Amino acid sequence: MKVFLLAGAINAFLAVALGAFGAHGLEGKISDKYLEVWKTGVQYQMFHAAGLLIIGLLMGKIQGSLLGTAGWLMLAGIILFSGSLYVLSVTGIKVLGAITPLGGISFLAAWVLIMVAVYKHL
């Protein structure tokens, strides 16, 4: 429970910091296309930071391993999805785009596990 609350708070902090860096530190240094890619990474990181916080809160109410698995998948998704977009943005190495969908699949699987855990609890 605590690990996901902490991970959510850390990732929300990082999303704000990386968003500010993108807006102020990268503007004019990378193309507009890659600046948009950076913004997508920040947006998804923040969404899923909130997801981690939700998981941490739900773990106080719902027992079982589904939420823990969802939390780890969501954290992996942030690293794979947002991380690959950040690196792609500053390096232009297009092959990194092949990693991004793995993060997206991790996000989807995490949300499905949250749905199942909540449904089973009802």
Image (spheres, rainbow, N blue to C red):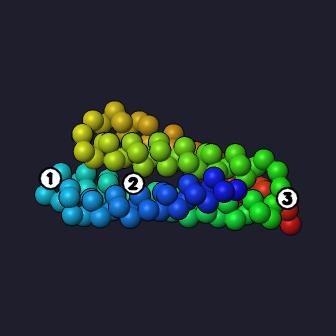
Which residue is located at x 81 percent, y 60 percent?
62
- Mark 3 lies on residue: 120
Q: Residue 41 carries which label?
A: 2
For the residue labelled by badge 2, is the local secondary structure a helix, a strand or a loop? helix
Q: Mark 1 points at which residue?
A: 29
Q: Quadrant of residue 98?
A: top left
| Separation (CA) of disc 3 from disc 2 | 32 Å
Is 50 situated above or below 105? below
**Camera-nearest residue between 25 and 89:** 25
Q: Which amino acid does label 3 sit on?
A: Lys
Residue type pointed to by label 1:
Lys
**Rendered residue at 36%/47% (across/down):** 85
Q: Are marks 1 and 3 in contact (CB under 8 Å)?
A: no
| Gap between marks 1 and 2 measured at Cα | 17 Å
Q: Would you identify the image quadrant in which residue 117 lies?
A: bottom right
Q: How crowded is mark 3: few (under 14 residues within 10 Å), some or many (20 or more)?
A: few
Asked whether residue 43 appears in the rendered view, the answer is: no
